[in-house]
């Protein structure tokens, strides 16, 4: 792949958004650019950012693919982790259980889509209910307190390494690199692109379209579980209703990051930049004592205007050619 | 005076001329058959006549008055209706509703008066011998043949005086075809002008009052019934191919060798039945057949995309049954699909991705890494080998000319060491120069020992590249032999089902 | 030519003789749903030893049903046109907040009720404009307004809950009954019946199906495709306004999270009712059954003393099984 799999105009747009947001806040108070504040922003963004990375692959695969269940997978995995910790088993085992559960849940989504041929939006709507339901069943609807867990576990969400938050440096960064690698440098990434662009042509070129799409759900599942682990460690609780906004927010991030909701054009780098935009907007608002809910609105506006801007660019380009 | 009269209709698409000064007049109470190969310009003519596109020049007269159609509705209002082979329908609406969308009969409150609508269509349904039970059924529950009849009823309902049939029988059964012809005869007797487009010669004597042969976008003759023999029609249709001699230096020895790849008695109804192809290595086998003859479906079945219901596929004498294109490729089969846009191109992706889509696994290095240097090198090699003109391998393929796009897709398959390579319409819609280039590449492939199959409805192409020719019609192999022996006319005659067609050698 | 590769749907080559209407109904999607509904109902009735029919339970069931059913009717229409609206929950919260403020400020119902509906129409129109004029895919556009409307809820409410809503809404919609049914439920049934009739018998209703079946053909047939789409989003807005009104009747309280997660329940009801997300196929009757099943599952687990948390699991399974089955039945005869 030449470049980083993102449209240059979109890359520019995101950087401008980022610059404007940061610059705007800096005008109000230069302190926001202090290292401590920047890392807080990052902590804020890690969990939904990881969800969005998984969502990127699903949307990229095309055929209207979206995963509405990522938040639910995060919650259920987190709950399983919590149960393991409550039993005083090694926390590593809990994390492993959570990640495996995420993979299984993703596989269930993928198989229902690829084998039963149910549109993924319906599949994941159904499993979203089911996974949240199971999370509630397992916990009896009560949050599991994890504050007494081994410090080495809590460090995942609360510790810091060479001055940077643990989950940013040792989780998000490696995951981002792995995803970018997967997307840009592997046969899977290439096959996914081609599948999302024209699945009939991809199938006739010998690409395993169904297997690839199925895999995207598994990846989304594992990453969602990882996000669940991080948030459990950060908050010191496992909540059966965790990440409820993550289902839709992760889609919004991916689209903001330049993905075509109809497939073939998503990019990991774009999703990361979009996550940063959202993190900055979010943090800046609360830093300046605005209610953080403005974040939601600003994301909505950015989402819509960015797609409209893209439409305008394409429309112009079509007129020219 | 003709009910509808076209004169001097010319149309270009990009640089390609689709129609060159076509004249055509159709009287009321007449069935006028428009006969021609694929690509002769028939569909362009219909699109002009139904107001879907405007001609570059020329006039259309209806009842003697010159008309310029503003849009399809305008043409409809002037009494023109078209029945396509795959009708445009609202699948989940009932038959009755399909006929009235946009023109419902309503009560004062805006309620749809189904009874009144049904009463209105009743005479037309009777005229077409259609059961009124059909009216309440969803359109999707009807076969294509019935859907066509419904659309004919709709045309009558809207007082169409000029009804165009666009290859209506290509996916109909024999019984459905008979019924359709009876109806067309009745419509004609009722004073309507019928324009019937086909490439099936056998249909001409059954329904035509006049026949116009269209070759390469121009009229090569208009005749009245009985004025011209089937043989002469074949000669006219093959006209383009005359002067294109069969391959100068065929390789009969190679073509006579044991087949390396064969399909034997392969069936996948309704697409094709009991088809056998024996494909030798080191030669080009041309498969000639018109659209709908099942030729691409045979290829898709061999390629693991379509599940055959019977028969076998052999490669090097061993029976194979690929369940997916992926598996077929692994076995050494390649297939360049027919429809560039739909089945081949990754339009907004770089040339390099397009060229290497089918061999990604060869460029995987541990751990899962694609060897980009290798891919780029491969792309460059292929580009220069096949003379693909693009700034660099990262150019988005959509921005290239049609000819270069097609060369790219051709190269995707041709540049790999396949044992068997099936090329489906390898040069459709591209300029003459590129066509010649691709033909030369095809000959080279054969010379290098590949078993090449070229599927085409372009007769000059088949003649230009084939060592041996197989002709298909309506899902069956109808002729097979040496191009020189069959001759252009023999091939066309077999493909269109003329009575004098050569037989399949026993 | 590509018919082979793209797959052609299975078709009867000859008209099948008419089946008995009853048989056809039972074999239809709605029939399957009705049977599911009855089985669920009987199971819950037996398992709960009649608790299903306690007055308090019936009332809350019926009102919950109404609150979901009304937007679900609008959602059915939007999905029939080939669109989708995921902003419904936030919109409900926003209308409840704005309208609730009006009520709390002492305005009478004569002002408040039209205000609820007009607000809904307005927000629906905003969605429609973004989708149609901005050419933004419906799911993206409404994902955006979902966030925006939610933000506006916070702005309107501040961080306080809105609690001083006069009980008049409860009195009208929940406590007042005509026969066995609370007014809210009657309203929902009336809306559903009205739109079932509209979709079935009115020209404009049939045009919605035509559009969803084949947008290109509908355009060529001279239908005002954009107007139909715009109207469908405005309609679901108005219905959301109505649902907000009923919601305040059921619990006279608005908080910043009011309506969040609601849209997924609505979409679940519609999808369960057999409306296809690709448009052009589905009925209000199906949505009625879909909504009842969704509510019955939620109600049933409580009555059966199963942990209420199983309702999500059950709902998910029911959606998967029912949609999976109907896809298996209607799957196009596809090439390999």
Image (tube, coloured by chain):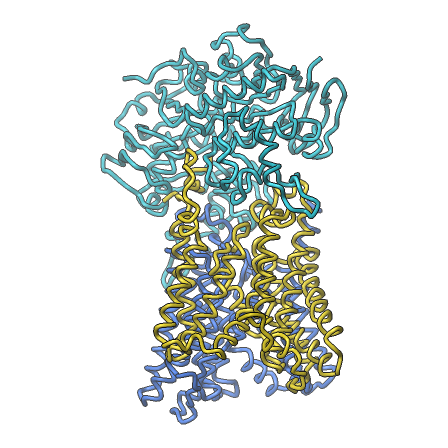
Q: Quadrant of the C terminus of chain C?
A: top left
Which of these two is toward me, B464 or C109? C109
Total numbered labels placed on residues in the image: 0
Q: Which chain is yellow?
A: C
- Residue C59 placed where, x, y %? 52, 75
Where is residue A20, by image quadrant? Answer: bottom right
Residue plotted at (65% across, 87% down) = C160
Query: Picture coordinates of residue B289 (x, y %)?
Result: 43, 25
- Of residues C307 and B301, the one nearer the viewer is C307
- Residue B314, percent across and down? 26, 35
Q: Residue at x 37, y 76 (%)?
A: C48
Extreme residue in the bottom direction: A148
Q: Residue at x 40, y 89 (%)?
A: A152
Say which quarter of the image contains residue B75: top right
Kindly give the residue lying farthest to the left in the view shown: B318
Instruction: Using the image, determine if residue B109 lies above or below residue A14.
Output: above
Colour of chain B, in one word, is cyan
Would you say A264 lies left or right of B422 here? right
Q: Relative to the observer, which residue lies in front, C171 or B168?
A: C171
Chain represented in blue? A
Q: Is residue C300 above or below residue C212?
A: below
Q: Is residue B505 above or below residue B158?
A: above
Q: Is residue C262 left or right of residue A12?
A: left
Left or right: B4 with respect to A276? right
Left or right of C31? Residue B431 is right
- The image position of residue C232, as x and y in percent, is 64, 57
């Amino acid at each position: 792949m030449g470049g980083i799999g993102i449209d240059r105009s979109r890359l520019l747009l995101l950087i401008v958004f980022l610059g404007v947001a940061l610059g705007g806040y800096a005008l109000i108070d230069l302190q926001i650019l202090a290292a401590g504040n920047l890392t807080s922003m990052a902590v804020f963004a890690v969990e939904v950012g990881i969800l969005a990375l998984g969502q990127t692959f699903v949307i990229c695969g095309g055929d209207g693919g979206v995963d509405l269940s990522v938040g639910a997978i995060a919650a259920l995995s987190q709950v399983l982790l919590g149960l393991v910790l409550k039993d005083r088993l090694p926390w590593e085992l809990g994390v492993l259980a959570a990640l495996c559960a995420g993979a299984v849940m993703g596989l269930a989504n993928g198989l229902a889509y690829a084998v039963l041929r149910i549109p993924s939006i319906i599949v994941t709507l159904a499993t979203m209910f089911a996974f949240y339901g199971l999370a509630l069943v397992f916990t009896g609807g009560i949050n599991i307190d994890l504050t007494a867990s081994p410090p080495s576990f809590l460090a995942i969400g609360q510790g810091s390494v060479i001055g940077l938050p643990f989950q940013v440096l040792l989780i998000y960064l490696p995951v981002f690199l792995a995803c970018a690698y997967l997307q840009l440098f592997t046969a899977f990434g290439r096959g996914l692109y081609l599948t999302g662009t024209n699945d009939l042509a991809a199938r006739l070129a010998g690409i395993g379209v169904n297997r690839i799409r199925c895999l995207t759900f598994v990846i989304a599942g594992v990453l969602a579980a990882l996000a669940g682990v991080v948030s459990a460690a950060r908050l010191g609780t496992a909540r059966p209703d965790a990440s409820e906004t993550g289902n839709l927010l992760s889609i919004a991030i991916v689209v903001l990051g330049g993905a075509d909701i109809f497939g073939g054009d998503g990019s990991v780098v774009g999703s990361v930049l979009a996550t940063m935009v959202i993190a900055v907007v979010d943090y800046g608002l609360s830093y300046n004592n605005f209610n953080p809910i403005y974040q939601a609105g600003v994301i909505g506006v950015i989402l819509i205007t960015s797609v409209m801007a893209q439409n305008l660019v394409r429309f112009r380009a079509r007129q020219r050619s | 005076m003709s009910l509808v009269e076209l004169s001097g209709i010319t149309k270009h698409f990009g640089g390609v001329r689709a129609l060159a000064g076509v004249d055509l007049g159709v009287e009321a109470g007449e069935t006028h058959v428009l006969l021609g190969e694929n690509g002769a310009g028939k569909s362009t003519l219909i699109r002009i006549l139904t107001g879907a596109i405007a001609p570059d020049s020329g006039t259309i007269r209806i009842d003697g008055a010159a008309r310029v159609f503003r849009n399809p509705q305008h043409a409809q209002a002037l009494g023109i209706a078209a029945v396509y082979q795959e009708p445009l329908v609202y699948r989940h609406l009932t038959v009755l509703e399909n006929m009235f969308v946009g023109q419902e009969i309503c009560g004062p409150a805006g309620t749809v008066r189904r009874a009144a609508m049904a009463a209105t269509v009743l005479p037309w349904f009777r005229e077409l011998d259609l059961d009124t039970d059909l009216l309440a059924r969803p359109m999707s529950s009807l076969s294509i043949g019935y859907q066509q009849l419904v659309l004919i009823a709709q045309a009558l309902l809207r007082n169409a005086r000029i009804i165009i049939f666009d290859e209506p029988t290509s996916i109909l059964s024999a019984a459905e075809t008979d019924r359709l012809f009876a109806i067309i005869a009745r419509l004609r007797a009722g004073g309507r002008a019928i324009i019937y487009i086909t490439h099936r010669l056998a249909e001409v004597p059954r329904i035509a009052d006049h026949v116009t042969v269209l070759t390469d976008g121009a009229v090569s003759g208009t005749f009245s019934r009985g004025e011209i023999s089937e043989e002469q029609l074949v000669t006219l249709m093959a006209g383009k191919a005359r002067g294109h001699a069969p391959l100068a230096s065929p390789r009969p020895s190679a073509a006579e060798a044991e087949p390396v790849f064969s399909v034997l008695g392969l069936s996948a109804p309704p697409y094709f039945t009991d088809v056998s192809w024996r494909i030798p290595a080191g030669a080009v086998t041309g498969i000639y057949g018109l659209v709908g003859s099942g030729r691409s479906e045979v290829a898709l079945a061999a390629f693991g995309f379509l599940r055959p219901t019977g028969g076998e596929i052999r490669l090097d004498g061993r029976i194979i049954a690929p369940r997916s294109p992926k598996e077929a490729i692994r076995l050494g089969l390649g297939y360049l699909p027919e429809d560039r846009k739909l089945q081949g191109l990754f339009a907004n992706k770089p040339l390099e991705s397009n060229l290497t889509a089918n061999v990604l696994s060869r460029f995987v290095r541990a751990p899962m890494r694609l060897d980009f240097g290798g891919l780029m090198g491969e792309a460059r090699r292929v580009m220069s080998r096949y003379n693909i003109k693009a700034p660099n391998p990262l150019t988005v393929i959509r921005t290239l000319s049609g000819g270069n796009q097609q060369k790219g897709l051709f190269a995707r398959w041709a540049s790999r060491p396949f044992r068997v390579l099936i090329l489906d319409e390898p040069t459709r819609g591209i300029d003459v120069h590129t066509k010649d280039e691709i033909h030369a590449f095809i000959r080279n492939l054969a010379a290098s020992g590949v078993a090449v199959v070229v599927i085409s409805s372009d007769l000059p192409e088949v003649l230009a590249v084939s060592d041996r020719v197989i002709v298909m019609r309506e899902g069956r192999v109808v002729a097979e032999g040496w191009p020189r022996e069959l001759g252009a006319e023999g091939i066309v005659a077999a493909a269109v089902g003329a009575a004098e067609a050569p037989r399949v050698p026993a | 030519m590509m018919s082979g590769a793209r797959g052609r749907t299975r078709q009867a080559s000859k008209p099948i003789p008419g089946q008995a209407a009853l048989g056809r109904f039972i074999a239809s999607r709605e029939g399957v749903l009705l049977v599911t509904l009855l089985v669920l109902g009987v199971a819950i009735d037996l398992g709960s030893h009649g608790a299903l029919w306690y007055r308090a339970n019936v009332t809350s069931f019926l009102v919950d049903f109404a609150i979901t059913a009304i937007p679900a009717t609008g959602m059915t229409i939007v999905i029939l046109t080939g669109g989708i609206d995921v902003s419904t929950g936030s919109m409900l919260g926003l209308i409840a907040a704005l309208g609730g403020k009006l009520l709390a400020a002492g305005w009478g119902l004569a002002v408040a009720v039209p205000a609820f509906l007009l607000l809904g129409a307005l927000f629906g129109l905003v969605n429609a404009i973004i989708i149609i004029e901005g050419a933004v895919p419906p799911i993206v556009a409404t994902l955006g307004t979902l966030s925006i409307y939610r933000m506006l809820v916070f702005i309107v409410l501040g961080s306080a809950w809105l609690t001083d809503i006069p009980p008049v809404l409860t009195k009208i919609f929940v406590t007042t009954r005509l026969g066995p049914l609370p007014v809210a439920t009657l309203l929902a049934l009336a809306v559903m019946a009205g739109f079932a009739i509209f979709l079935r018998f009115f020209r404009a209703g049939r045009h919605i199906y035509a559009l969803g079946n084949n947008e290109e053909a509908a355009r060529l047939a001279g239908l005002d495709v954009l107007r139909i789409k715009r109207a469908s989003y405005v309609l679901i807005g108005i219905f959301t306004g109505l649902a907000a009104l009923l919601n305040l009747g059921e619990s006279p309280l608005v908080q910043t999270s009011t309506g969040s997660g609601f849209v997924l329940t609505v979409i679940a009801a519609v999808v369960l009712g057999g409306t296809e997300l690709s448009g052009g196929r589905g009925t209000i009757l199906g949505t009625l059954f879909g909504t009842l099943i969704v509510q019955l599952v939620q109600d049933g687990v409580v009555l059966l003393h199963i942990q209420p948390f199983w309702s999500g699991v059950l709902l998910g399974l029911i959606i998967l099984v029912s949609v999976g089955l109907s896809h298996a039945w209607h799957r196009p005869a596809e090439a390999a």
